[in-house]
Image: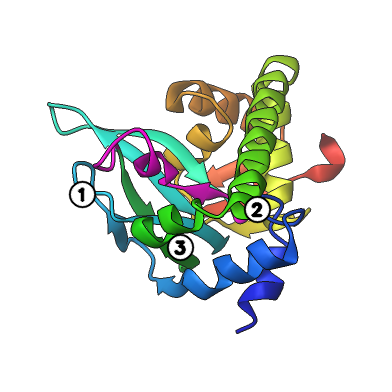
């Protein structure tokens, strides 16, 4: 596995210096995670941060009633759990693979040591700012596109323009990924089914792209 090449194609790290990327490669440990396998649980001591290379990871919190509330569906190229670097010593959410996924695990201690290097620290801060701009763009995306647009854009990004999809993601997870409530998505899917555009039964999803 060429870890350096993989990191070079991840947007968060594509513009950092070769020296900084090489240092990151040295401390990155690849791990394959099976479907439904947890990476960590809410409240666990935060010793590791992660970069998702392929697959999907669901981040969620558990209420006092035992209900799982999805916070985010992590997509390839995103770093997650970096909150333990500065803000919290324990994971504020749980992370479980939605399908077989590949992550790079990075020790919090080793990453903190890298931040003592001025070149790496400047590269990292620059990329944090890039992530903040990305989040700003996401807010704009959510406010300028309706739920139907976001659904089809997400499905095309995940699976391409296929007429039949066997989804590895639940409707609840898709709702979280597009910034909608499960109830809103259910109402949308019912309308789209009546319009002959989408039929989602179980994990089987049929899309009439020509009718959109």
- Residue 206, how many percent across, how many down? 65, 50
Q: Residue at x 38, y 37 (%)?
A: 86
**Quadrant in the picture for the C terminus:** top right
Q: Which residues are magenta?
A: 76-92
Report how far apart the C-alphas of labels 1 and 3 lie in the structure: 24 Å
Report how far apart the C-alphas of labels 3 and 2 lie in the structure: 36 Å
189, 16: nearer the viewer: 16
Mark 2 element type: helix
User: Which of the two discs, 1 and 2, labels the residue nearer the N terminus?
Assistant: 1
Q: Is residue 55 visible?
A: no
* Magenta-span inclusion, residue 78: yes
Which residue position is annotated with label 2? Answer: 119
Q: Residue at x 43, y 45 (%)?
A: 82
Q: Residue at x 31, y 63 (%)?
A: 37
Which residue position is annotated with label 3? Answer: 99
In the image, taking residue 112 as reference, residue 197 lies left or right, namely right
* Magenta-span inclusion, residue 106: no
- Residue 38, how many percent across, how many down? 29, 59
Which residue position is annotated with label 1? Answer: 45
Task: Please identify the dominant SS of the magenta region.
Answer: loop
């Amino acid at each position: 596995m060429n870890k350096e090449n993989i990191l070079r194609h991840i947007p968060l790290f594509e513009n950092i210096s070769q020296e900084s990327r090489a240092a990151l490669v040295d401390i990155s440990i690849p791990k394959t995670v099976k479907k439904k396998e947890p990476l960590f649980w809410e409240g666990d001591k935060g010793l590791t941060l992660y970069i998702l290379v392929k697959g999907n990871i669901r981040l969620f919190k558990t209420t006092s009633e035992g209900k799982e509330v999805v916070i985010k569906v992590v997509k390839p190229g995103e770093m997650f759990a970096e909150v333990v670097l500065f803000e919290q010593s324990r994971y504020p959410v749980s992370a479980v693979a939605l399908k077989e996924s590949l992550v790079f695990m990075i020790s919090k201690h080793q990453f903190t040591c890298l931040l003592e290097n001025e070149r790496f620290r400047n590269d990292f801060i620059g990329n944090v700012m890039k992530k903040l701009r990305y989040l700003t763009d996401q807010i704009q995306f959510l406010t300028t596109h309706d739920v139907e647009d976001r659904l089809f854009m997400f499905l095309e990004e995940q699976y391409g323009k296929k007429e039949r999809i066997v989804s590895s993601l639940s409707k609840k997870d898709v709702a979280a990924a597009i910034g909608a409530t499960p109830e809103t998505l259910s109402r949308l899917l019912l309308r789209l089914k009546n319009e002959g555009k989408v039929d989602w039964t179980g994990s089987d999803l049929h899309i009439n792209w020509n009718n959109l």
